[in-house]
Amino acid sequence: MSSDPADDGTPEDMPFDGNPEPTVETLQKTVAELQAEKTELQDKYLRAVAEAQNVRRRGQQDVEKERKFGIERFARDLLSVADNLGRALSAVPADLDPAMQNVVVGVQATERELLSVLERHGVTRIKAIGEAFNADFHQAMMEVEDPSVPAGTVVQEMIPGYLLAGRLLRAAMVAVSKGGPSRSFDASNENDTVA
């Protein structure tokens, strides 16, 4: 067994062709092959490390995204409850008997609590009335002729809009003014309004 090349400590695939003393050319060729193999393995290693880092980073991003936006469907469903509470409160007549007034106070408290819970979970209401129409946050349902208000200003909000962690959850459905002065101001108009 001592004549077996693997037993004497040399690898079996060494290209020495059975010569006990390899030539310089053979050794140089072997070194070049080993360096090429080392370079290839090092490249594979670096690619594997980079891929592992990318997978870890994507995983962290997915967890963060799920943490922020995982309640999106649930929050969107709750918005209809908030809308219905708001509609119920807006339909209450002004001359209400005192016994029914307690019911209205309870519904108001429920609406405040619901909006507070939504806000604690990152759902915030979009400010619409008096703001310039922004197609990213507002959905124009109609135009209202009002020369006293600059054109393109939101004058009425039919259904409020909401953001979830800064991302649009639902656009505000609004009425936009037309026929008034333009919303863009030149330098002379700005100086007049400041003074």
Image: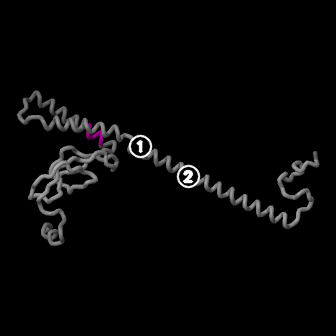
Magenta: main secondary structure: helix
To which quarter of the image does residue 25 belong?
Answer: bottom right
Q: Does the image show residue 158?
A: yes
Residue at (21, 55) in percent of width and height: 133
Q: Residue at x 73, y 58 (%)?
A: 37
Earlier along the polypeptide chain: callout 1 or callout 2? 2
Residue drawn at the location 23% of the way across and 49% of the way down: 139
* Amino acid on which disc 1 is placed: Arg
Q: Residues within 10 Å of mark 1 (few under 14, many from 20)?
A: few
Colour basis = one colour
Q: Residue at x 13, y 57 (%)?
A: 178
Name the residue that disc number 2 marks. Answer: 53
Left or right of 138? Residue 38 is right
Q: Percent from the top left, x then y, of residue 5?
A: 89, 50
Region rendered in magenta: 114-118
Q: Position of residue 35 (x, y in %)?
A: 74, 62
Q: Looking at the picture, does residue 114 appear above or below residue 139?
A: above
Answer with the quarter of the image where residue 170 lies.
Answer: top left
Residue 142 vs residue 155, the one in the foreground: 142
Crowd band around label 2 with a 10 angstrom C-alpha radius: few (<14), some (14–19), many (20+): few
Which residue is denoted by mark 1 in the rendering? 67
How far across and how far down the image is residue 72, in percent?
Answer: 35, 41
Q: Say which element carries label 2.
A: helix
| Residue 193 magenta-highlighted | no
